[in-house]
Image (spheres, helix red, strand yellow):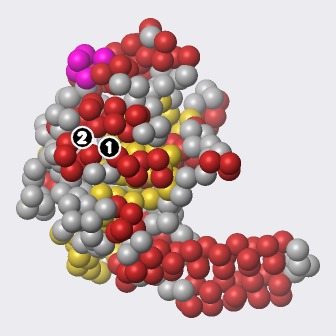
């Protein structure tokens, strides 16, 4: 499973690729387009293996072209959803269309199709960001979890990409940013420290340790490393600390998510006011987690059936018409109100006398505000609102 938008958001924050110009601000941080619903691997933790969508067709160029007028609304267009984007034969033309609109383009790949021809195209088509998914630093575990892949071949592809980047003028602008996305499972987390060492040796720009946050069945629930309560696994905490220490000592960018559910945040990292996900068939949805037609979800031991949350299809209406649709505006307003309340309360607290009674008062006001502007039903059982 590859969740490109989360990866993009973290890379934007850490590598500071996203530097909005207030004079020419764009309303969206990113438009994510799932140009391929299929994958050439059978990863043990991916819902597409167990519950493939009924429509397995790649996004046609004609449908993608309907979005081109709206790319200037976003700083980024990310060409990836639940499948492998390099399976779409139009990907490089699509990337050119994004760049032609003056917007940055990124993608996430499992690395198996990143052959010499694809590597040259990454450079030639000026891809700004490419993330390669890895689940372990040993072939045995990696190949077992990402069935159909060959670890040594993927690492060799990464080395070739880094070498070509260094050889070409792309190093002048330090593009593409090359990131490794490391899926955390109960098996893979034990090799996290050694994986960061390998990432440093490879010369990539960054490694992101991603939670197995879409818990769609009991097996995924057992394989995840984050905790449903506030008691973190001590072994995992130690491994994470060791990894952070090594990254700091070697001046390497290492990013990760929370491993315990704490208090609910006002807005998740994929703020629907700033991000949007468009499926390969043209459905406009708030995020990848609400983009699939079949979305079972386990949350704190309870199973939920979450339907696809589509506000329209770009085959029928323009993106702007769908974005301005009353139901979509109301969905987003919830997050705007929550964020505004939070900002106001923080400012009030900052300029007040900070005492225990004041802290308690602040906590009470915050809780009341989050209740007043409660999350949409679809988001109430999503761990992203807790920073996972």
Mark 1: few, some, or many residues within 10 Å (few <14, many ≥20)?
many
Mark 2: few, some, or many residues within 10 Å (few <14, many ≥20)?
many
Q: Which residues are magenta?
A: 115-120
Q: Quadrant of residue 147?
A: top left
Where residue 47 sits: x, y (%)? 20, 59
- Mark 1, secondary structure of its residue: loop
Of the pair 358 and 325, the residue shown nearer to us: 325
Which residue ends up furthest to the right in the rendered image? 353
Q: Could you tell me which residue is drawn at 46 percent across and 40 percent down?
A: 103
Q: Could you tell me which residue is drawn at 70 percent across and 88 percent down?
A: 365
Q: Quadrant of residue 359?
A: bottom right
Measured along the vertical axis of the image, is residue 113 above or below residue 355? above
Residue under numbered circle 1: 79
Separation of disc 1 and disc 2 at Cα?
A: 7 Å
Residue under numbered circle 2: 85
- Mark 2, secondary structure of its residue: helix
Asked whether the residues under the numbered discs 1 and 2 touch, taking CB atoms below 8 Å apart as contact, a structural biologist would say yes
């Amino acid at each position: 499973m590859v969740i490109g938008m989360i990866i993009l958001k973290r890379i934007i924050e850490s590598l500071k690729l996203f530097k909005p110009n207030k004079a020419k601000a764009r309303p969206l941080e990113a438009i994510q387009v799932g140009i391929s619903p299929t994958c050439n691997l059978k990863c043990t933790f991916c819902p597409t293996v167990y519950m493939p969508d009924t429509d397995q067709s790649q996004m046609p160029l004609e449908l993608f072209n309907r979005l081109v007028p709206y790319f200037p609304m976003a700083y980024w267009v990310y060409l990836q959803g639940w499948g492998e984007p390099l399976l779409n034969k139009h990907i490089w033309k699509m990337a050119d269309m994004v760049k032609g609109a003056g917007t940055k383009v990124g993608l996430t790949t499992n690395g198996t199709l990143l052959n010499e021809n694809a590597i040259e195209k990454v450079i030639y088509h000026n891809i700004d960001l490419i993330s390669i998914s890895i689940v372990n630093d040993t072939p045995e575990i990696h190949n077992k979890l990402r069935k159909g892949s060959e670890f040594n071949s993927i690492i060799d592809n990464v080395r070739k990409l880094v070498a070509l980047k260094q050889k070409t003028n792309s190093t002048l602008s330090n593009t593409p940013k090359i990131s490794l996305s490391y899926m955390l499972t109960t098996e893979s987390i034990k090799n996290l420290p050694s994986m960061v060492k390998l990432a440093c040796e490879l010369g990539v720009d960054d490694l992101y340790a991603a939670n197995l946050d879409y818990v769609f069945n009991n097996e995924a629930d057992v394989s995840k490393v984050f905790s449903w309560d506030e008691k973190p696994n001590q072994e995992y905490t130690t491994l994470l600390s060791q990894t952070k220490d090594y990254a700091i000592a070697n001046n390497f960018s290492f990013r990760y998510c929370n491993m315990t559910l704490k208090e609910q945040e006002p807005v998740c990292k994929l703020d629907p006011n700033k991000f949007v996900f468009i499926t390969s068939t043209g459905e406009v949805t708030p995020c990848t987690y609400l983009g699939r037609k079949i979305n079972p979800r386990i949350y704190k031991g309870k199973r939920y059936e979450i339907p696809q949350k589509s506000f329209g299809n770009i085959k029928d209406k323009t993106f702007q018409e769908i974005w301005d649709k009353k139901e979509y505006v109301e969905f987003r307003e919830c997050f705007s109100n929550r964020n505004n309340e939070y900002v106001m309360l923080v400012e009030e607290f900052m300029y007040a006398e900070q005492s225990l009674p004041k802290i308690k008062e602040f906590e009470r006001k915050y809780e009341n505000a989050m209740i007043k502007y409660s999350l949409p039903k679809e988001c109430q059982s999503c761990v992203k609102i807790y920073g996972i």
